[in-house]
Amino acid sequence: MSACLRFTRRVWQSFITTKGHDAQCFPNLVVHRAVPGEVNATLKIENYNLHGGLILSMTDTLGSLAVASRGYWMTGVSTDIGTSFVRPAGRPGDVLHVKAVLTALGKSLAYTRVDFTNPAGELVAYGYHTKYVGKSSTHQKNVKLSEDGEQSPTKRQKTTKRTINASSTIRTELLGVSKNSPQNFLSTPRSIEFARISNAMSDQTPPDHGYENSSS
């Protein structure tokens, strides 16, 4: 499972936990695929949610999940939303397929489109959802995702790696040898003392610069 799918499902579960319209209307929604900027899901139509309002509610939710697929824990506030109905969505027991795409993401606004298709692949409805995300980009639970949907290293991980590499370089320079140098060089008293000092340096824990791992 990719980091993007795992994160998007966590956001979806947080929607259910808050017991809003998502939990009331379509708790059985299943998120099958998520890559940065696109989410695919299915919903089995039930008697209690067989209504056109379901499409609008799902446009709201799936548009939000499309924003989440870019690593946003808080998906912003709706500024505009709408749907168009092309044909009947189906009957109880039918499966509705949904694809949500983040068409544009700026500093303040996110634009999404949501398509609904039946099992035959026919378009039954589509919607759009615009969200204000100006205050969402700095949330502490956000994650940074690469274009392939995997999680990018945090600043702290990068800093630690650089510190370790620097310690290794210093140790090599103190000893005055390369990896291919004869091992018996290390047996001289002076080289043993240099090795002791450099090993002590490399064993020190890198300083904590206050970076917080954004994944939980």
Image (spheres, grey):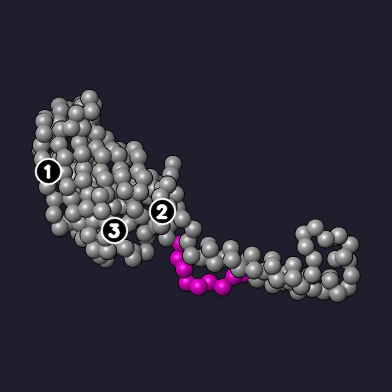
Task: Determine whether 97 is above or below 110 in the image.
Answer: above
Left or right of 199, for residue 14:
left
In the picture, residue 91 is in which quadrant? top left
Amino acid type of the residue that numbered disc 3 sits on in the rendered structure: Met
Question: What is the C-alpha distance between the residues marked 3 and 1?
Answer: 23 Å
Pointer 2 or 1: first along the chain = 1
**Image position, residue 27 (x, y; %):** 24, 41
**Image position, residue 192 (x, y; %):** 84, 70
Residue matched to label 3 = 74
Q: Which mark is residue 83?
A: 1
Pointer 2 or 3: first along the chain = 3
Give me the residue at 23% from left, 63% from top. Answer: 108
Query: Can see residue 128?
Result: yes
Of badges 2 and 3, the one in the foreground is 2
Give me the residue at 11% from left, 30% from top. Answer: 88
Pointer 3: residues within 10 angstroms few (<14), some, or many (20+)? Answer: many
Amino acid type of the residue that numbered disc 2 sits on in the rendered structure: Leu
Give me the residue at 35% from left, 40% from top. Answer: 33
Left or right of 115, for residue 192:
right
Give me the residue at 80% from left, 58% from top. Answer: 180
